[in-house]
Amino acid sequence: MVWQVLGASGLTSAVLAGLALTVPTVRVSADLAQLLQASVMALTAQYTSPGAAAAGAAGAVLALAVLGRGTWCVGMALSVGEELRCSRVWSAAHSER
C-alpha cells in the first residue's frame, strides 16, 4: 500500500510539473476581471517568444504522457488482480471436489 501511495505522489508531481510548464504564472487578485485580463496578457506575452510555445507544448505532452502511462499501469494492475482473484476462486472451487 505504501509503494502505491509513493507511486501516486510521484505521478502527481510529474503531472503538475508538466502543467507548470504549460500554464504561466499570474498574480492572484480578488477581482475576477483583473485576474482574467492578467491571465490573457501573460499568455500572450509567454507565447509570443519563439521558444515559449515549444516549452508549453512540451509541458502539455509530458503531462498527458505521464497521465496516460499512469492510467495504463493502474488498468493493467486492476486486470491482473482480477485475473488472479478469478484463478484463485476457480482453483479453490475445483480443489474441494
Image (cartoon, grey):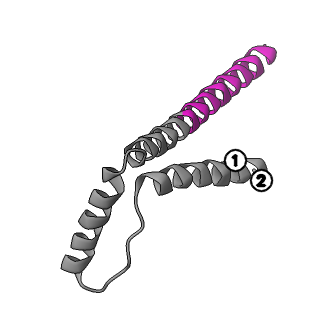
Q: Nearer the viewer, residue 43 or 73?
A: 43
Q: Residue at x 48, y 53 (%)?
A: 21
Is 91 part of what is drawn in magenta? yes
Q: Decide if residue 47 is on the left or right side of residue 90.
A: left
Q: Which residue is drawn at 70% across and 25% down?
A: 84
Residue that extends furthest to the bottom in the rendered view of this protein: 30
Tag shown at residue 76: none
Q: Could you tell me the amino acid type at mark 2?
A: Val
Q: Earlier in the sequence, mark 2 or mark 1?
A: 2
Q: Main secondary structure of the magenta part?
A: helix
- Coordinates of residue 70 in the picture (x, y in percent): 58, 38
Residue that extends furthest to the left in the rendered view of this protein: 33
Residue carrying label 1: 7
Q: What stretch is highlighted in magenta?
A: 69-97
Q: Which residue is drawn at 60% across and 27% down?
A: 79
Is 92 part of what is drawn in magenta? yes
Q: Decide if residue 6 is on the left or right side of residue 79.
A: right
- Coordinates of residue 16 in the picture (x, y in percent): 53, 55
- Coordinates of residue 68 in the picture (x, y in percent): 50, 35
C-alpha separation, residue under disc 2 versus residue under disc 1: 9 Å
Rendered-image quadrant of the C terminus: top right
